[in-house]
Image (cartoon, rainbow, N blue to C red):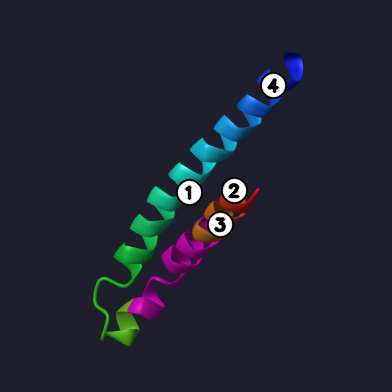
Amino acid sequence: MNAQRTTATLVGALFLTAMVASLVGGGLVESAIAAPYDLAAIAANDALLIAGILLELVNAIAVLA
C-alpha cells in the first residue's frame, strides 16, 4: 500500500508540474511574440521567450516521465 501511495504522489506532482509549466510557459511565449511580424519587438523580449520555451521543455519532460 505504501508503494502505491508513493507512486500516486509522484504522478500527481508530475501532473501539477506539467500543468503549471504549460500554462505559464504558453503565456510567456504568447506575450513575447504578440507582434509576430515585428522582429525587433520579439528580440526585445528574448528573456520572456527563452523562459517560456524552457517552461514548455519542463512540461514535455514532466509529461514523458
Identity, as a three-letter code, of the amino acid under mark 3: Ala
Q: Nearer the viewer, residue 17 or 43?
A: 17
Identity, as a three-letter code, of the amino acid under mark 4: Gln
Question: Which residue matches tag 2?
Answer: 62
Is the C-beta separation of discs 2 and 1 under 8 Å? Answer: yes
- The stretch of residues the image draws in magenta is 42-55
Q: Secondary structure at mark 4?
A: helix
Q: Is residue 56 above or below residue 12?
A: below
Question: Which residue matches tag 3?
Answer: 60
For the point 27% across and 85% down, which residue is it?
38
Sequence-first tag of 2 and 4 = 4
Question: Which residue matches tag 4?
Answer: 4
Determine if the magenta segment contains residue 33.
Answer: no
Identity, as a three-letter code, of the amino acid under mark 2: Ala
Disc 3 or disc 1, which is closer to the eye? 3
**Residue 45 numbered mark, or none:** none
Question: Which residue matches tag 1?
Answer: 21
Q: Secondary structure at mark 1?
A: helix
Sequence-first tag of 4 and 3 = 4
Q: Total marks drawn?
A: 4
Disc 4 or disc 3, which is closer to the eye? 4
Extreme-right residue of the structure = 3
Sequence-first tag of 1 and 4 = 4
Distance between mark 2 and mark 3 Cα atoms: 5 Å
Choose top left, top right, bottom left or bottom right for residue 61: bottom right
